Amino acid sequence: MQKRDSGDHCTRASSGRPSLCDVDVPSEDQPSSQVLRSNNIDAPPTRELQRQGHISYDAKEWTGRNHKYKQEVVRYGNFALALEAEVNKLEQQFEAESNEFRFLCEQVEAARQEYENLEAAYKQEQREKEDAERALVMARRRRDSQQKKREALKKDVRELMKNLCKTQEEAERKYIRYLEAWSEKQRVLQDTQRIEAERQALEKTSEGGLREVQKLEESIMGIRFDFQQDWSDAKEIDVTGLLRVTKSRPGEENWFAARTRAMPKTKIPIWTKTMSPP
């Protein structure tokens, strides 16, 4: 028999429980206690045991060895109990370690899931950051474009203001000329109306004058006709005697004679033609 040596022998012995270190292990050339205790028909008979040299012909020696084997059976039973207790303890430790390992696996899985979530969130943040940077670049480009458009628009507005000022000045000048032309037109219209009124008034007055002139012409024609008749009658009479007969004022006969002396008797004097006959 070989006795196992261990460092925790004293600790396990002091605890009061059997340990694997307290059991003697038989050598390989000795039969096991299971073979010796077995009541099975397959158990080796005595002759076999004798042939193998395990049992001698001495009954006393066989009895001692049988007692020894019983002690070994007890030791092996204690060893089995200790082994079972150790197995139970190891199973409990294994179960505890399994639970701890399962808990650690769950923690690892949770950590892995959290890491994956953090990695996904980081990737999402990176994508959002890249999108924000692209949006910022696009916004800056739009801002620059809008700034250029505003500058161009301001330039166009300044040009339009200049053109508007010029156009306004030109419009003011044209408006002033229009007002002057309108005032001149109004003045011309007023003058035209005044002239038309004067013309109408003059026509009215001239109609009366024409009627008077016609009356005068008629009277002159009558006087002329009478004078021509009288002149034709006076050709044959003495002017001096005619003047004497008509009792002219002193000096009038000389004037009348001077005017008529050099004229032919058959021609009508020009000074008597005040108006040509119609």
Image: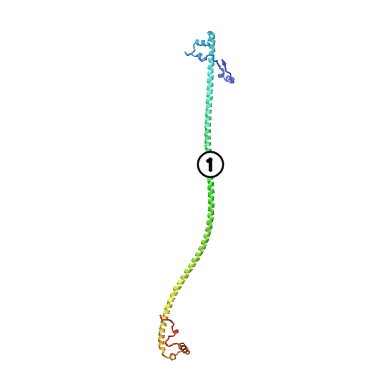
Residue 241, position in %: x, y? 43, 91
Q: Taking 246 as reference, is 90 above or below it?
A: above
Colour mode? rainbow
- Residue wearing tag 1: 130
Left or right, residue 29 beside residue 227: right
Instruction: Point out the image quarter for the C terminus.
Output: bottom left
Vertical comparison of 86 with 267: above or below = above
Residue 19 seen: no
x 54%, y 50%: residue: 148
Picture layout, residue 61 above or below residue 243: above
Residue drawn at x 53%, y 23% as measured from the top left:
90
Characterize the local packing of mark 1: few (<14), some (14-19) or many (20 or more) Cα atoms within 10 angstroms. few
Q: Where is residue 232 in the image (x, y as percent from the top left)?
A: 40, 87
Residue in front for this viewpoint, 47 or 197: 47
Q: In this view, does 60 lie to the left or right of 209?
A: right
In this view of the protein, can residue 199 be seen by the observer? yes
Residue drawn 53% across and 56% down? 159
Q: Which residue type does callout 1 highlight?
A: Glu
Query: Which quarter of the rendering shows the N terminus?
Result: top right
